[in-house]
Amino acid sequence: MTLNDFYINTYNSLIRVINYTINSDKRIFWLYLVSSMLLAYYVYHKTKKKYSFLKYIFNKKVWLSQSSKVDYALIFINSFVKVFLLGSFVYYGLKLAYYTDEYLSHTLGLSDNNFSHFQIMFGFTITLTILKDLGTYLTHLAQHKISFLWEFHKVHHSATVLNPITQYRIHPVELIINNITATLIFGITMGVFDYLSNHPIDELEFLGVNVFSFAFLFFGANLRHSHVKLKYFNKLENIFISPFQHQIHHSNNPIHFDKNLGAKLAIWDWMFGTLVKSESVATLKFGLGKNDDINYTTIFQNLYMPFLKVSQHLTKWFKNR
Ligand SMILES: [Zn+2]
Ligand SMILES: [Zn+2]
């Protein structure tokens, strides 16, 4: 890569980050930020804070903290990584869909279903949403339980304050792993629906985004990474993960470790016994805990530590063989 290419890619990454606010499938799309503000106001009003709403939302200790600066650096670095990756993931997703369709036609014979275009769209949208959510849960569970994956996922948990950009605070290696999972699920689901349908496969959309994702993003997804303690009704928290339930996932208290791993749906946590509901938790502190936070303060540490820790695990493993 020449210096000129580097400048062009850096510029494109910057534009891509700015475009997140006008792109309806991104969590920080302006409309979701507005709806999050309204929900935050509801929490502010209910908890009867003694200071102004603006001070509550734009808390300097959150937005200008060292932890948040690492978030801002990572959203930029990851968007740079995406320039190189995104095209290939779309390509492999479509290729996988093609081979899945071919395989099914070959083994089961041509499908003679007569589903309408709407039935296929509805079926595809709901199936993809549920499978993506299950895939995200299982990948997240693996990232907490398998030591070398945990070393990379630690970067997300090393945030000691949460703001909406913390959503993008993931190590580039985790970004690649998450994209591989998403590509496999997308490719296979698309291939199955391609096989079942004579129609083009589309998702049911609202404002250019999957309807279920829109609902999730509109109803406060941004508040998951924030200090706004938005809780759902007790029973609803068995089905959907509330923002406060995700904040519990970031708790540095060992009793909350490996809990509330779900993305949109809480049913996987409920089924696998990893669900904690808001009513059982009063106060929270975020981060990895006293012994580890100190090793993940700067952007350099967050990028480099996972590789160092993985190499230490490997050395230990080889020695014990
Ligand atoms: Zn996690
Ligand atoms: Zn998180």
Image: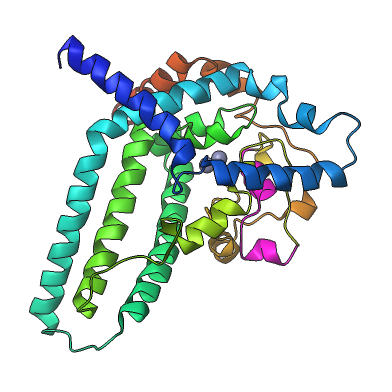
What is the span of residues highlighted in magenta in the rendered image? 234-250
Q: Is residue 257 among the parts visible in the rendering?
A: no
Q: Residue at x 62, y 56 (%)?
A: 241
Location of residue 24 with respect to 285 vertically, above or below: below
Quadrant location, the C terminus: top left
Residue 277 rendering spot, x and y as whole percentages: 71, 55
Q: How many marks?
A: 0
Residue 98 rendering spot, x and y as whole percentages: 14, 64
Foreground of the two, 217 or 22: 22
Decide whether residue 42 is among the magenta residues: no
Residue 183 rendering spot, x and y as whole percentages: 28, 52
Image side of residue 80 versus residue 36, left or right: left
Foreground of the two, 317 or 270: 270
Q: Is residue 240 among the parts visible in the rendering?
A: yes
Q: Which quarter of the picture shows residue 3?
A: top left
Image side of residue 220 versus residue 132, left or right: right
Location of residue 165 with respect to 232 vertically, above or below: above
Return the residue found at the far left: 106
Decide whether residue 241 is among the magenta residues: yes
Location of residue 26 with respect to 72 vertically, above or below: below
Q: Residue at x 29, y 85 (%)?
A: 115
Q: Residue at x 58, y 28 (%)?
A: 159
Q: Residue at x 23, y 88 (%)?
A: 113
Residue 307 rendering spot, x and y as whole percentages: 35, 23
Which color mode does the image show?
A: rainbow
